[in-house]
Amino acid sequence: MDTYKEFQLGQFRFVRDDYFAHIHFPTHAGKAMAHKMDIDAFLKPLQRDIAWSFFYGMVKFDDVFGTINHYGTVEVFAGKYHKALHEGGFWHAEELGRGEVERVFTLMLEDWVPADFDPFAAPRETGSAIGPKRAANLDAIHRKRIVTTRIVKQSDRQEPEYPVNEGFKGMTFKEGEMHIKPGHEDKFAVVNLYDYLARSDVTWNPSIVSVLEHSLFCPTTEEHRLPVKHGNDRVEWFIQLNGQIDWEVCNQNTGELMAYVRMRPGDVCAMPSDIQHQGFAPERSMLLVWENADPKMPEKIRSGAVPGDPDKMVTMK
Ligand code: PHB
Ligand code: FE
């Protein structure tokens, strides 16, 4: 019978069975330790960590295991950013080459994600990864975003390829009015962002729709729970476009709870750079994530050149 493969990454060893991913590691105190996660709850962050190239800063798969992007190298950790485990010496971390982590995580996805489970889908839209080894789901794992090479123009318009998601059925999409001076017709277009987002077939996977220097607008549709706890290395803004998302905000070094935030349509929220956040969306909803892609940003915050606290960034005069 075909069985799941085991994977080694530095001194971490990853094993899966029908229900769990087991992460084995040597502790700081010199003992062997194993941490378990429900298999679906492990594969969803694993998929995003790879799809997002380790994202900005810290991606915690749960309170114990995760990665930190050092843009070239990746810290892989277990227990290091959990108060009790860290204090007890029950932790381990290694700084590894980005390519090596990417290679092992991708092989793990290819072997552990079964055909009936899509890690990007909302729970009601997919099966579960629970159970014995079966055929893989390579299409879902290697999903590529549609890339445009220039600004959309009115003459590019075509019938939408993707259907409106069940969660947004009945929503009306009214386009704005545009009056173009003759001779300039192929320079402009009106796009309805709600119409675009309503057709997203993935959850908790922001896509970049506008770039202005380091300013990235990354809207996304959300449902159920953000599969990662994100400890950003810079300030990040959220603008709630539709529905509701509750955020749990914790200290990123200890996991200690600091705040709950409930966002309703129109609410804007800025997350400080020293926290971790995880969102919960009871129904499919739309969120605009606004990121600052300045590669020097973590260093600017570390050196004090730029505040990591949005409260000190925005001044109302
Ligand atoms: C975040 O960590 O800020 C984040 C990630 C994915 C989302 C939304 C927010 O879909
Ligand atoms: Fe975030």
Image: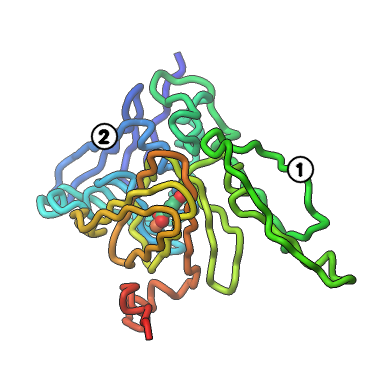
> SS at mark 1?
loop
> Which of the marked residues, 1 or 2, is nearer the chain's N terminus?
2
Task: In the displayed orientation, state which residue is furthest to the left.
Answer: 88
Residue 104, horizontal then vertical, whole percent? 45, 42
Task: In the displayed orientation, state which residue is furthest to the top.
Answer: 1
Residue at 39 percent across and 23 percent down: it is: 130
Rendered view: 130 above or below 235: above
Left/right of residue 2 with respect to residue 12 in the rendered view: right
Q: Nearer the viewer, residue 141 or 188?
A: 188
Q: Mark 1 or 2, which is nearer the eye?
A: 1
Work out which quarter of the rendered image holds the C terminus and state it: bottom left
* Within-10-Å neighbours for mark 1: few <14, some 14–19, many 20+: few
Residue type at numbered disc 1: Glu
Residue type at numbered disc 2: Lys
Residue at 23 percent across and 50 percent down: it is: 92
The numbered mark at residue 159 is 1
Between the C-alphas of marks 1 and 2, the distance is 46 Å
* Residue 50 visible in the picture: no
Question: Pointer 2: what residue?
Answer: 36
* Within-10-Å neighbours for mark 2: few <14, some 14–19, many 20+: some
Residue 19, horizontal then vertical, whole percent? 33, 24
Residue 304, horizontal then vertical, whole percent? 32, 82
Residue at 68 percent across and 55 percent down: it is: 175
> SS at mark 2?
strand
